[in-house]
Amino acid sequence: MAFNKQYVDSPLNSRTKLLYLGDTYKKMVLNGLIVHDYDNDSNVLQEYDDCGEIEYISELPDPKKINPNKCKMLLIIEDMNLSTLNRTEKEKINRLFGYSSSHRGVSLCITSQNPLDIPVSARRMCNIFTIYKIPDLCGLMLMASRTGYKKDDFVQFFKMCTDCHDNVTIDLTQNTPAPLRFNMFQQIAKDND
């Protein structure tokens, strides 16, 4: 399969949601902050070794102070128990997605094994969804309705996913060259059966 890099060249300030099962996805990061709810886990530190300049932080940054130089930055919110966020943390995620992404030059990626754990405000502001086949059919059907597709569309999309690393990307970015992709790089025709 030929990889079409233009399909994954997300615009500055994209808001991406990765919905995955376990550690089935690969990280594609060049520069950014990674938020974990634990410090100095040697396994985590090693998994990003090939990603360039990375800063690990253990709590959500202040949306008004992040990236003061407004240079291109990626913030990955990963391995946080999103279902137990307190009100202040939910507000920070809301402002990171709503303010920092548009006014501070920050692209965001949030990962979760359960789509319902991601705060509603962040889910609604995401424009790119990379979804791995998960056993929670209710969660998948929720994603279908939130991305403008029908349940039957999702059933067809995920028939292509035969390996645990396979995924479907739905890109709602304006003027995207490939709104629907298999494994991020291969465009899927909308009338795909």
Image (cartoon, rainbow, N blue to C red):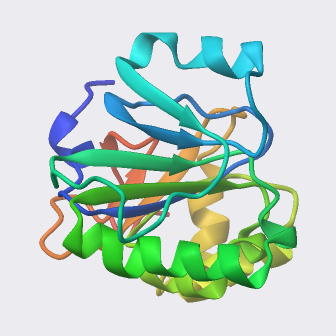
From the viewer's side, name the closer residue of 41 and 144.
41
Q: Which percent across, then down, holds residue 9? A: 20, 45
Q: Which percent across, then down, holds residue 28? A: 41, 30
Q: Is residue 130 visible?
A: no
Please identify the quarter of the rendering in which residue 42 is found: top right
Q: Is residue 62 above or below residue 188?
A: below
Taking the image as shown, residue 158 lies to the left or right of residue 10, namely right
Taking the image as shown, residue 27 lies to the left or right of residue 28, namely right
Please identify the quarter of the rendering in which residue 14 is found: bottom left
The number of numbered badges drawn on the structure is 0
Taking the image as shown, residue 164 lies to the left or right of residue 1, namely right
Please give the name of the residue rendered at 35% of the width and 46% of the height, measured from the top-left corner: 74
Please give the name of the residue rendered at 82% of the width and 58% of the height, measured from the top-left corner: 81
User: Which quadrant does the N terminus fall into?
Assistant: top left
Q: Is residue 118 visible?
A: yes
Q: Is residue 173 above or below residue 121?
A: above
Taking the image as shown, residue 70 lies to the left or right of residue 142, namely left
Please give the name of the residue rendered at 39% of the width and 31% of the height, measured from the top-left corner: 29
Please give the name of the residue rendered at 78% of the width and 71% of the height, measured from the top-left corner: 117
From the viewer's side, name the closer residue of 191 and 49.
49
Please identify the quarter of the rendering in which residue 12 is found: bottom left
From the viewer's side, name the closer residue of 34 and 144.
34
Q: Is residue 77 above or below residue 103?
A: above
Q: Which percent across, then down, holds residue 17? A: 53, 61
Q: Which percent across, then down, holds residue 156? A: 60, 64
